[in-house]
Amino acid sequence: MSSATLSPALKQATPVVVDHAKGSWIHGTDGIDYLDFTTGIGVTSTGHCHPKVVTAAQEQCGKIIHAQYTTVMHKPLLELTDKLGEHLPAGLDSVFYANSGSEAVEASVRLARMATERPNIVVFQGGFHGRTVAAATLTTAGTKFSAGFSPLMGGVHMAPFPYAYRYGWDEATAVAFALRELDYLFASRVAPNDTAAFLIEPVLGDGGYLPTPPAFLAGLRERADKHGIILILDEVQAGVGRTGKFWGHQHSEGLIPDILITAKGIASGFPISAIAAPTSLMAKAWPGSQGGTYGGNAVAAAAGVATLQVIAEENLVENARIRGDQMLRGLSELAPKFPQIGDVRGLGLMAGIEFIDGDGKPDAVAAAAVQQAAIPEKLLTLTCGPMGNVVRLIPALVVTEEEMATGLNRFEAAL
Ligand code: PLP
């Protein structure tokens, strides 16, 4: 019998192998304690192995692990829906569950097409919505997610995102430009009354941790209302407290999406995702047309209930805001000392540090070098951005003041 090795496609960015993890810390098999500012790409919101999440999952395993909710409903999913409902925007009173962000993105787009009977979806430059074929079609944060397996899904059109730093403009100018380009797209190539949905993140995640300006989201809402287009907000990475508000879009006062997508932080590491929409809209998808076998798994749902309880009990949304301010302030203070840093931005516990070369061009080599240099400093970070030149810091919502100070010191040492 032959033995197997991991596929080259699973190549790691760091040599760390986890033995066990707790809170903001990963304990490697090398005996080293690493400060984890990656959280499994924004997933372990309550920190690694929060005791209440662990207990909830363990207890649920002894009751029922899996019952497909289209056949037999289970208690954790009802409780999770109830808890989630406390946070959902007005009118989004119906929830549908899947396992991953990509599946939820696909469900939202399918729903928008079914509801409007229109083919087109407009996405925005630098958006990341996943890697399954349809989700990869909707993803424009770099070409690596879709290169080599065309043809992709049809009917997807990309419009500019107001990336003020890279354009070299102020935010208002960038927003006005991007909205004008969107209007031009509608006037020239894609009929708005053939458009089912806008799909956008409140903070571009893999696209480089760029907060979407509220004025841009307001412009999308206005156009969506005018043309009967569904506004889908992908809160997979920015939701569940990460930005210092429960939802990333709450930084845009008064904004209400038609469909909201959530995943990642909702269950502290257990795979579950959801879309929320008004019941009248959700009813346009006929039973059995969406989802999959494992959607809304009972153990994941129980972990989700515990996660939302912990977030409330420990005031973690507020902690994300305060520690996020500490992180962005600290990074902004050290940036002037390092000419390779072109921009520091973010929202709450999402910080992006954009690296540039001597000509101001994106420098992915520098970003990767900083990520590697952070490993001996015992700090784990991620890179992102369509050009790969952004280091992102995405600590757990439970991060303490001291841990944040340690993380900033270690990051400076890596720089
Ligand atoms: N949408 C956003 C904003 C994401 O950040 C991600 C994953 O990083 C996805 C969708 C896809 O989620 P998943 O990897 O769970 O399929």
Image: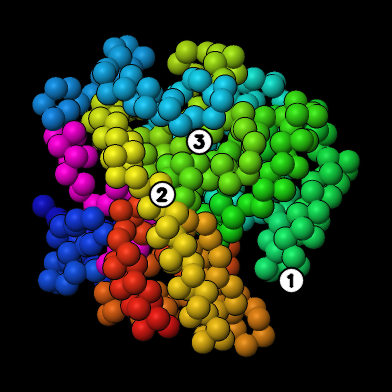
Give the structural element (helix, strand or loop) at label 1: loop
Camera-side mark, 2 or 3: 2
Can residue 110 be seen from the camera position used here? no
Separation of marks 1 and 2 at Cα, in angstroms: 33 Å
Q: Earlier in the sequence, mark 2 or mark 3?
A: 3
Disc 2 packing (10 Å; few <14; some 14–19; many ≥20): many
Q: Give the mark nearest the N terminus, 1 or 2.
A: 1
* In front of the other: 370 or 302: 302
Report which residue position mark 2 lands on.
Answer: 318
Segment colored magenta: 35-58
Going by the image, does 57 lie left or right of 260?
A: left
Q: Quadrant of residue 33?
A: bottom left
Which residue matches tag 1? 168
The image shows residue 304 at horizontal and vertical percentages of: 31, 34
Mark 3 near ligand 1 (CB under 8 Å)? Answer: yes
| Whether residue 403 is situated above or below residue 253 in the rendered picture | below
Q: Residue at x 65, y 78 (%)?
A: 361
- In the rendered image, which residue does mark 3 sit on? 261
